[in-house]
Image (tube, rainbow, N blue to C red):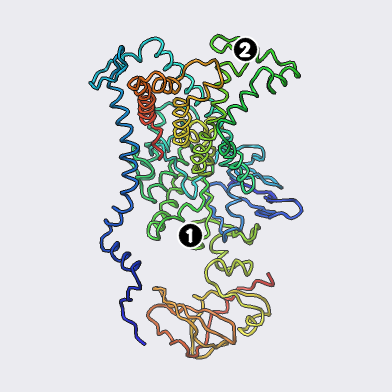
């Protein structure tokens, strides 16, 4: 499998050279062809800037970016064979849906009849047949999102970039769109690069993902890698709701004296165990209850599966866990 | 101490607010009556009176206005001497509007998309400042600038570019002994005076075009020129139309600039001024004044049909 997008020590600094704001700082990255790649991170972590570096709306201040092996450092956005689904969709309000979708073909000089036929095909692909004559303002958020997708796909880009495309949708619609996007990507066999700050979205949709923190990549891997074996404290904390254990607590739990992560769902409550604490908070999640224990000032969370007894707040409980679930991270 | 669920009214303001809450239409009526009276009586009423006058005619011997409905006065507008005035004024207004649009666009575009902080304040000040000083002072200042011995002529002589001005002044229709006595001078001063009225609505319209829309256009393969033509211009068009309504109608109605600068050829505003003053021909003055209104209505109708307001 060849590389669709490569970042070679790419930086994007803003502001004066003496005190730069390092939006992206020395990023190395390979996105393989046909994969669904997610860039995950909190806001301001550099993930969106990386996406804009691929589309060409930002120029790197250092390093090189290759798309299918070609250096695109001097290629403006309109000559890059990549297309973007924008966060706010950026549909043109003065055009109807069909003309919006056909826009990329129109600026290439394709005739009206042909491009409208193509646009209608794309609208059928995103299940919006018959909506061509409407204005974007007459559509719901989910429908606009599909129009934006159709408009980006009509040019048959080699890489599709999606900038938090589901952020504005409500939960139910978002989950439906996640499944649809994933199915569409499989069907088209296209490389999707997806930016999100939602860890569940990234884990459930991506083939592989990069976790960004402060302009750098904290970890790249498959969702499983990242979830089960976080490389740093930041990743463990940001992806999911893992317990990040300081060295002394790891040792108290029977491990070596280094930072470790422990998934709440790998723990259970027991009468006795290596660590006891006071039940401080309970959060009912439907599939189970998340119990937070206060163990001598350190908080540690455990999951009680649905149907099992939940301790009352203020009572004492011990934590037991599968030793293999304790993932050591050294001092990172 | 337990409090009642209903707080006692503290005074007339509380009681009045309660009245408005119970009868929202009372507040609406109170708020709307003064502006509706103003708009209905002072604005539209006087306009209707004007329209009425234009359907009267003047008795050529006694000079008395005959209060009978006739289209005779409008017929007089088509007399060559009067029709010339209409054509001259409308062409000038169209040329001024076009020039204002072309000059204003880059300024408005810069202000809307790039200027931040102090530069934005400087932009507003630069555009508004000329509006604060007296209109007459500015026009007379331009008369001096454009005069044969003025700074423009002097600068041209110093840089050996007088031939440009001389060449322009020899074009048929623009003749004059200097820019200040040529229709070209009238045009330049009109453009200067009305430019802010074009820049401000344009800038407001451009400011509402999100950056992501321009990026989307480029992302889909459009060149800068294509983005300008198919995205920026259509989205800014309501602002351009608003600005052009100002520049067009202000030029149509102005009677001072063509009096001070240019070759004293009549414009609609000057004709109205002379007809209702010295000549006492109110019906013809009214008929002249109706022409700009009709032109603006036709213009707006065309703009609407072309989809200028679709993005609103």
Closest to the observer, B256 or B159: B256
Asked where in the image residue B262 lies, by quadrant, the reply is: top right
- Left or right for A138, reference A277: left
Chain of the residue under label 2 = B
Q: Residues within 10 Å of mark 1 (few under 14, many from 20)?
A: some
Q: Residue at x 60, y 19 (%)?
A: B180
The residue beneath circle 2 is B177
Q: Is residue B99 visible?
A: yes
Q: What percent of the width, then of the height, locates residue B201? A: 49, 38
Asked where in the image residue A117 lies, by quadrant, the reply is: top left
- Left or right for B65, reference A251: left
C-alpha separation, residue under disc 2 versus residue under disc 1? 76 Å
Q: Is residue A272 above or below residue B116?
A: below
The residue beneath circle 1 is A201
Q: Residue at x 38, y 30 (%)?
A: B300
Q: Residue at x 40, y 28 (%)?
A: A114
Closest to the observer, A10 or B143: B143
Q: Is residue A72 above or below residue A289?
A: above
Asked where in the image residue B83 lies, by quadrant, the reply is: top left
**Which mark is nearer the camera, 2 or 1?**
2
Q: Quadrant of the C terminus of chain B?
A: top left
């Amino acid at each position: 499998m060849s590389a669709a997008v490569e970042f070679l020590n790419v930086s994007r600094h803003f502001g004066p050279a003496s005190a730069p704001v390092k939006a992206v700082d020395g990023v190395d990255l390979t996105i393989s062809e046909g994969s669904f790649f997610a860039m995950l991170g909190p806001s301001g972590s550099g993930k969106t800037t990386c996406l804009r570096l691929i589309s060409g709306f930002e120029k790197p201040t250092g390093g090189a970016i290759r798309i299918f092996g070609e250096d695109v450092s001097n290629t403006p956005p309109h000559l890059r064979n990549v297309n973007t689904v924008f966060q706010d969709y950026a549909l043109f309000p003065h055009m109807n849906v069909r003309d919006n979708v056909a826009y990329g073909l129109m600026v290439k000089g394709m005739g009206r009849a042909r491009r409208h036929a193509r646009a209608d095909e794309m609208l059928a692909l995103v299940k919006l047949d018959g909506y061509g004559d409407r204005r974007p303002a007459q559509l719901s958020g989910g429908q606009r999102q599909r129009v934006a997708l159709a408009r980006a796909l009509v040019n048959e880009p080699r890489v599709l970039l999606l900038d938090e495309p589901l952020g504005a949708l409500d939960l139910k619609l978002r989950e439906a769109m996640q499944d649809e996007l994933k199915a569409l990507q499989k069907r088209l066999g296209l490389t999707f690069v997806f930016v999100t700050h939602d860890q569940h979205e990234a884990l459930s949709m991506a083939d592989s993902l990069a976790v960004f923190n402060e302009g750098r990549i904290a970890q790249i891997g498959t969702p499983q890698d990242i979830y089960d074996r976080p490389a740093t404290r930041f990743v463990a904390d940001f992806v999911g709701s893992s317990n990040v254990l300081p060295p002394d607590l790891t040792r108290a739990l029977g491990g070596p004296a280094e930072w470790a992560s422990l998934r709440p769902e790998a723990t259970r409550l027991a009468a006795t165990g290596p660590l006891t604490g006071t039940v401080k908070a309970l959060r009912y999640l439907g599939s189970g209850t998340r119990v937070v224990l206060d163990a001598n000032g350190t908080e540690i969370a455990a999951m009680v599966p649905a149907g099992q007894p939940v301790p009352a707040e203020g009572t004492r409980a011990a934590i037991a866990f599968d030793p293999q679930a304790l993932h050591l991270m050294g001092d990172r | 101490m337990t409090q009642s669920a209903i707080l006692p009214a503290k005074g007339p303001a509380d009681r009045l607010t309660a009245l408005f809450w119970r009868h929202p239409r009372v507040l609406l009526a109170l708020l709307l009556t003064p502006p509706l009276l103003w708009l209905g009586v002072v604005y539209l009423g006087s306009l209707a009176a004007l329209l009425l006058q234009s359907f009267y005619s003047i008795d050529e011997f006694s000079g008395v206005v005959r209060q009978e409905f006739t289209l005779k006065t409008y017929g007089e507008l088509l007399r060559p001497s009067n029709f010339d005035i209409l054509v001259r004024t409308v062409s000038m207004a169209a040329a001024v509007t076009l020039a204002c649009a072309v000059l204003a666009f880059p300024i408005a575009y810069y202000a809307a998309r790039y200027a931040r902080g102090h530069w934005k304040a400087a932009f507003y000040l630069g555009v508004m400042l000329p509006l604060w000083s007296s209109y007459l002072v500015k026009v007379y200042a331009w008369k001096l600038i454009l005069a044969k011995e003025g700074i423009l002529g002097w600068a041209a002589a110093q840089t050996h570019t007088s031939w440009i001005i001389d060449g322009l002044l020899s074009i048929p229709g623009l003749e004059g002994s200097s820019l200040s006595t040529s229709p070209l001078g009238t045009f330049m001063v009109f453009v200067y005076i009305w430019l802010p009225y074009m820049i401000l609505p344009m800038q407001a319209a451009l400011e509402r075009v999100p950056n992501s829309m321009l990026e989307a256009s480029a992302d889909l393969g459009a060149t800068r020129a294509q983005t300008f033509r198919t995205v920026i211009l259509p989205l800014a068009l309501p602002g351009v139309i608003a600005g052009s309504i100002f520049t067009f109608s202000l030029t149509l109605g102005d009677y001072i600039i063509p009096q001070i600068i240019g070759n004293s050829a009549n414009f609609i505003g000057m004709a109205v001024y002379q007809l209702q003053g010295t000549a006492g021909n109110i019906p013809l003055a009214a008929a002249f004044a109706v022409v700009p209104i009709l032109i603006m209505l036709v213009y707006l109708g065309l703009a609407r049909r072309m989809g200028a307001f679709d993005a609103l």
